[in-house]
Image (cartoon, helix red, strand yellow):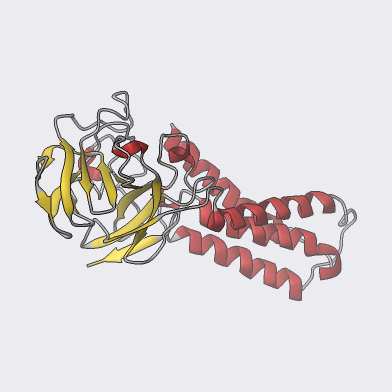
Amino acid sequence: MLIYCLLAATLLLAGIPIYVVAKTRGHLKDSWPRLLFAVSLGFMICLYGAWYLLSMYLQFVSWSLTVGLAARAAVRPKPEVAGIKKRRGLYIAGSALCILLTVLYHSGTKQAKYTVNLHFPLKHGKYLVMQGGKGLPTNLFHYSYRGASFAMDLVELNKWGNRANTIFSKNLDDYCTYGDTVYAPCSGRVLRMHDDNPDNVPSVRKRGPTNTNQVVIAADSYYVFMAHLQQHKVFVHEGDSVVVGQPVGLAGNSGFSLEPHLHIQAHMRSGQGVPWYSEPQALILFDGEEYLLNETVKVE
């Protein structure tokens, strides 16, 4: 149900600016609040929308329609109708909210004291950041969990820009990410591994966050945690030394997971003798680049 609600909300919000600009009347001096609202909402939903549930390419279609119709309304105004100046304040307030959310998309609400530069842990495909960023609002589902404000969820996209063969499937093999090889994003020692937990049938995640197949790598100055791996498909053992790019397991759907994806987060090593997850969290860079919600990474 959550998946369909996210998709419905995305399509509805994307349709609002198109409708608004299509109904815009009057000259620019009177219609600019409506056009500003439409453009700012259209851009905001391109950033936040759950486009990967249908196709990531639809965001460009939505944005192109919004901008194209807004430009046409600005240069070729239609005859003014009565009441054109009504709701001007609401449009300006709506624009301000959309602009604020756009700014927060890039800035986040949590400052990163530490950063960790990792190699991308997946190969041979186009991957989407399904969750990621500096806390709220782009990392909503991670924000409330211990030390996970900078965590990232990664999924593979197919040629249609979708992460699965259908909008939502209970068949694990329908998801592009399921069975992807996960590679060590850094060199270090395997601090912890677990792969006895069964993979969930989407969208059942009753087993909770402590029942996930995982690998924790201790590098010289930080820890990297990767979760939701396939049952009995972790290739390394505790105490093993690994090098960057070494296969460590297969992506799955174990633990607190609605559908197959790779969860990754990083923590600094403080030397205070506390568990890795209680160490200071770090913002992840992949090959020197910071990635946010709905951004894509193409790797060979």
Q: Is residue 160 above or below residue 278?
A: below
Q: Is residue 285 above or below residue 233?
A: below
Q: Residue 290, percent across and down?
A: 41, 61
Horizontal arrangement in the rendering, residue 87 relative to residue 11 (left or right):
right
Residue nearest the viewer, comparing 109 with 35: 109
Q: For the N terminus, give its image quadrant.
A: top left
In the displayed image of the protein, which residue is found farthest to the front?
272
Q: Residue 217, percent across and down?
A: 21, 47
* Quarter where residue 287 is shown: bottom left
Q: Residue 74, percent across and down?
A: 75, 71
Q: Is residue 25 visible?
A: no
Horizontal arrangement in the rendering, residue 204 relative to residue 131 (left or right):
left
Residue nearest the viewer, comparing 162 with 250: 250
Q: Is residue 292 visible?
A: yes
In the displayed image of the protein, which residue is found farthest to the bottom?
75
Question: Image point 54% across, 42% down: which residue?
Answer: 9
In the displayed image of the protein, which residue is found farthest to the top?
206
Residue nearest the viewer, comparing 199 with 112: 112
Q: Residue 207, percent across and down?
A: 28, 24
Question: Image point 9% across, 46% down: which residue?
Answer: 240
Question: Image point 22% across, 41% down: which residue?
Answer: 252
Question: Image point 17% across, 53% down: which residue?
Answer: 188
Q: Is residue 284 above or below residue 149?
A: below
Horizontal arrangement in the rendering, residue 220 relative to residue 292 (left or right):
left
Q: For the C terminus, give its image quadrant.
A: bottom left
* Quarter where residue 75 is shown: bottom right
Q: Is residue 130 above or below residue 46?
A: above
